[in-house]
């Protein structure tokens, strides 16, 4: 039937695209059947039906799902199969091709789920201001590429726009400063300001309970406007500002060459006056620049510019981990050892105003800077100041000097201990501890042991200890066998020796006097 339908529509001068849309099959399938005779199509179908496929045992399941939920994708079908048959091993492309064939054979068209939106009534004058952030990449006059960041504002009633740019990521302090500049630009502010859930202003939003950052909460308390946060993945609730951001990127910033941030902001204001605000808005069919003077009369008046420098500028806080680091933008930054205290592990961070790429960390809100780091643009990195690590070499050196002081030939001892530390860098403390123990127990034999170890290149603390024990044992044994007291203890090499009379040796050999 599929073969006959394709040829009938083709004979009626239907285009390939029209046939595909009418029969809900792919264009390659149509071309394949058009190039076949009726007998060839029968043979192809018989061959296809006789050729088993890996997913044929699950054919009824797949067909039932597609008939009940025509919008399902191949990936969803595969997931449902794996849920019911965990031992099934099948690739995504295999399932996708199989689902496609079943759709064509059983004429099951894939339905596209369309979200229904409800038109939002126009906001009254002075009621709402929408705010959002964006970023672009621009070519510079030196033929390089730079990333620029901007914040955009739009009045919900008049659609009157404002924007401000930076050549670095925004901080909460930057956001507050730009708010104040926008209020000066508008000559006031609205009862309500709409934001997305951005880390600059919010910590969390739990079923309508907003938790703002300390710094931004202080600013809201001072200006006394209502904060409205959009739900995540719901840009339609702030569609006005989304369109403004899109317009800024695609109209003002597109193909523009960057020279300096001051010049860029100046050109941005000129664009607003020339194009952004005078052009007719496609929804209201009015010019924002003509409607704005009326809305301005309904804005909350700005009597004085707030000092955003004094609104708890260092109030962005971080908790110190047990390894004495804090997290900032997907990286870890070190703080001095001992900063972490279980009962008080909070610090305050801020961006250095004079060096925007520098992160400052304070223990107290108005206290001294305890750590300063260059902000990394990478992710998952540990940025550590050497001063924040334990000075392990200091303890090693002190231990070495203490051991050297026990030897008469300190130069030789220093050379020997240095070589041991080089050969066993990970076990320096253990090596020095063994030598220290040997010195404390048998100080009498350490000079001879040192000479013997250097002579035989025994650069190991265990060897040093064994040589000390050997010298002690040999001395005791020799003294016990000797009939006369020791006449000479140390030869030129520092090795302990004994001198006996000739009679002692003849008695041992059994000779005569």
Image (cartoon, rainbow, N blue to C red):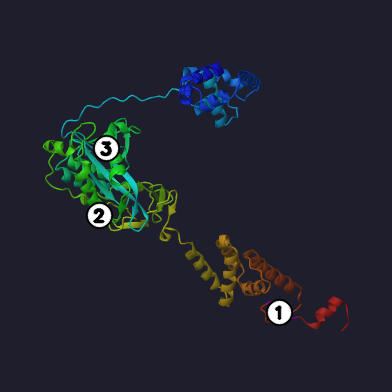
Q: Nearer the viewer, residue 478 or 340?
A: 340
Compared with 423, 94 (above or below) is above
Residue 486 location, x and y as percent?
71, 79
In the drawing, what numbered circle is on residue 486?
1
Q: Is residue 485 left or right of residue 326?
A: right
Q: Quadrant of the N terminus?
A: top right
Q: Nearer the viewer, residue 317 or 302?
A: 302
In magenta stretch: residue 7:
no
In the drawing, what numbered circle is on residue 94?
none
Q: Which residues are magenta?
A: 495-499
Q: CA distance from mark 3 to mark 1?
A: 102 Å
In the drawing, what numbered circle is on residue 263?
2
The answer to whether residue 481 shows anywhere in this view is yes
Using a 10 Å C-alpha cutoff, classify the residue at mark 1 as few (fewer than 14 neighbours), some (14 to 19) or many (20 or more). Answer: few
Q: Nearer the viewer, residue 383 or 132?
A: 132
Q: Quadrant of residue 200?
A: top left
Residue 135 location, x and y as percent?
33, 46
Using a 10 Å C-alpha cutoff, classify the residue at mark 2 as few (fewer than 14 neighbours), some (14 to 19) or many (20 or more). Answer: few
Using a 10 Å C-alpha cutoff, classify the residue at mark 3 as few (fewer than 14 neighbours), some (14 to 19) or many (20 or more). Answer: many
Among the two numbered marks 3 and 2 on one chain, the one whose residue lies closer to the N terminus: 3
Q: Quadrant of the C terminus?
A: bottom right
Tag 1 secondary structure: loop
């Amino acid at each position: 039937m599929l073969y006959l339908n394709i040829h009938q529509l083709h004979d009626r001068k239907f285009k390939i695209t029209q046939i595909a849309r009418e029969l809900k099959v792919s264009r390659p399938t149509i071309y394949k059947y058009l190039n076949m005779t009726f007998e060839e199509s029968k043979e192809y179908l018989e061959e296809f039906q006789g050729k088993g496929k890996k997913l044929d045992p699950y054919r009824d399941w797949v067909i039932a799902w597609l008939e009940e939920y025509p919008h399902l994708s191949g990936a969803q079908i595969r997931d449902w199969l794996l849920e019911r048959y965990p031992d099934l091993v099948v690739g995504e492309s295999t399932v996708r091709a199989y689902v496609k064939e079943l759709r064509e054979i059983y004429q099951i068209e894939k339905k596209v789920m369309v979200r229904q939106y409800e038109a939002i009534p126009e906001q009254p004058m002075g009621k709402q201001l929408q705010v959002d952030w964006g970023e672009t990449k621009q070519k510079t006059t030196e033929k390089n590429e730079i990333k620029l960041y901007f914040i955009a504002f739009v009045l919900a009633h008049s659609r009157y726009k404002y924007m401000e740019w930076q050549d670095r990521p925004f901080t909460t302090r930057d956001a507050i400063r730009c708010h104040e500049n926008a209020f000066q630009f508008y000559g006031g502010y609205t009862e309500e300001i709409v934001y997305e859930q951005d880390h600059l202003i919010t910590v969390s939003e739990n079923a309508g309970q907003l938790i703002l950052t300390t710094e931004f909460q202080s600013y809201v308390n001072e200006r006394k406007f209502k904060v409205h946060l959009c739900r995540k993945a719901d840009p339609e609730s702030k569609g006005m500002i989304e369109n403004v951001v899109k317009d800024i990127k695609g109209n003002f910033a597109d193909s523009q060459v960057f020279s300096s941030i001051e010049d860029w902001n100046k050109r941005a204001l000129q664009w607003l006056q020339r194009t952004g605000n005078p052009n007719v808005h496609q929804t209201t069919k009015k010019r924002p620049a003509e409607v704005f003077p009326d809305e301005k009369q309904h804005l909350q008046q700005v009597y004085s510019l707030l000092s955003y420098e004094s609104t708890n500028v260092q109030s962005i806080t971080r908790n110190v981990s047990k390894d004495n680091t804090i997290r900032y933008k997907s990286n870890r930054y070190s703080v001095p050892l001992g900063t972490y205290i279980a009962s008080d592990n909070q610090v305050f961070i801020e961006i250095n105003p004079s060096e925007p790429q520098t992160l400052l960390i304070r223990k107290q809100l108005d206290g001294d800077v305890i750590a300063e780091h260059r902000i990394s643009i990478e992710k998952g990195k540990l940025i550590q100041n050497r001063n924040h690590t334990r000075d392990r070499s200091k303890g090693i050196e002190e231990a070495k000097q203490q051991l050297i002081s026990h030897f008469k030939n300190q130069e030789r001892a220093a050379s020997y201990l240095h070589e041991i530390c080089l050969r066993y860098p990970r076990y320096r403390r253990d090596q020095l501890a063994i030598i220290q123990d040997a010195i404390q127990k048998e100080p009498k034999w350490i000079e001879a042991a040192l000479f013997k170890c250097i002579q035989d290149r025994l650069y190991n603390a265990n060897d040093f200890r064994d040589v000390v024990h050997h010298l002690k044992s040999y001395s005791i044994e020799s003294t016990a066998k000797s009939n006369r007291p020791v006449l000479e203890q140390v030869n030129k090499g520092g090795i302990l020796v004994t001198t006996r009379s000739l009679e002692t040796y003849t008695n041992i050999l059994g000779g005569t006097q």
